[in-house]
Image (cartoon, helix red, strand yellow):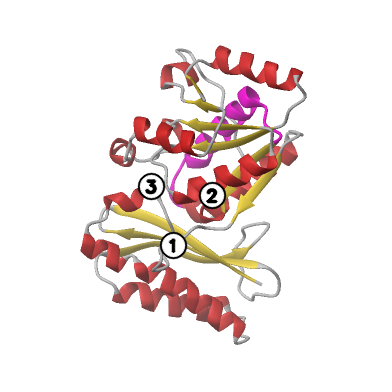
Amino acid sequence: MEVITKISEMQTMVFSIKDRKESIGFVPTMGALHEGHVSLMRSARDENDELVVSIYLNPTQFDNKEDFDNYPGQLDKDIEIVERENADVVFAPCTDEMYPEGFCTYVTQDKLTDTMCGRLRPGHFNGVTTIVTKLFNIVKPDKAYFGQKDYQQSVVVEKLVADLNMEIDVKVLPTVRDEDGLALSSRNKRLNPEERRSALCIYSSLLKAKSMFASNVKDAKEIIEEMTSIIKKAKHTRTDYISIVNAHTLEDVSLINEKAVAAVAVWIGNTRLIDNIILE
């Protein structure tokens, strides 16, 4: 496995792979890897000739400097994890490489970023769409792999690829959870034991939404009220949003008449966690 830090070297590697007419599976990450990332790598390994994993903590998608500064970093350990999954290349550039002096071009997206996290984190998705576009241009993957936990991000990336005519197959894989149901996240490491227990209210609220919908409750407000009650009862919680949105447009719905997503963002102490469940 090769560890590459320079864009020019990564592009040379990609040209060589394309010359051999081999396919590239790509897993973009911000590091602090966990079993959720591993599941993406394993799918990419199985479905492609070459597996490329990027590890880059992208500053432009953080609307809060403290959140960026506190994001867990473990590059050496991450490289070991990727190597165990038989990746061919780790692309781990520095910020000066990705955003050199004078950088001033950003990719923006309307509508899909007006709700949920986009409404509460100004500029976040401009950072996401810009870095994803850059990475796609550098790595030139045939398939790119994302997790459902970041549902809004996955829809934004799918639309980015479609609108800009990128010949990339975006694969969105199911959320990987701990045994108690908590969605795996790099930020979970910041929870103390009591906060970790409180965080279980997130998945409990989503299961409640799913059971109500399965019982033919279609009123989004009624479901959200029940979800809110569950989260409020837990200690150390502060809700950013609880939304039920159209699965494709991400617009809030009042009555669930087609595929929808119940999505939440909750602060557990000083750690913001997101999760969702599909209602169909």
Amino acid carrying mark 1 in the image: Tyr
Which residue position is annotated with label 3?
Answer: 186
Say which label, 2 or 3, has the lower sequence index.
2
| Viewer-proximal residue among 192 and 243 | 192
Residue at 41%, 62% in the rendered image: 178
Q: Is residue 158 above or below residue 59?
A: below
| Pointer 2 residue | 39
Name the residue type under label 3. Answer: Ser
Find out whether the residues at labels 1 and 2 contact each other: C-beta distance under 8 Å: no
Q: Give the residue type at disc 2.
A: Ser
- Looking at the rendering, which quadrant does residue 89 occupy? top right
Question: Does the rendering let one see residue 110?
Answer: no
Main SS type for the magenta part?
A: helix
- Which marked residue is nearer to the observer: mark 2 or mark 3? 2
Q: Which residues are magenta?
A: 120-142
Q: Mark 1 or mark 2, which has the lower sequence index?
A: 2
Q: Which residue is mark 1?
A: 241
Residue under the image location 63 percent in, 29 percent down: 136
| C-alpha separation, residue under disc 3 versus residue under disc 1 | 20 Å
Residue 252, given in percent of the width and then of the height, sits at: 59, 64
- In this figure, what is the number of numbered marks? 3
Can residue 36 be found in the magenta stretch?
no
Viewer-side label of 3, 1:
3
Few, some or many residues within 10 Å of mark 3 (<14, 14–19, 20+)? some
* Quadrant of the image containing the C terminus: bottom right
Does residue 109 sit above or below 50 in this rendering?
below
Query: Where does the image place residue 8, in percent across and percent down from the top left?
Result: 57, 12
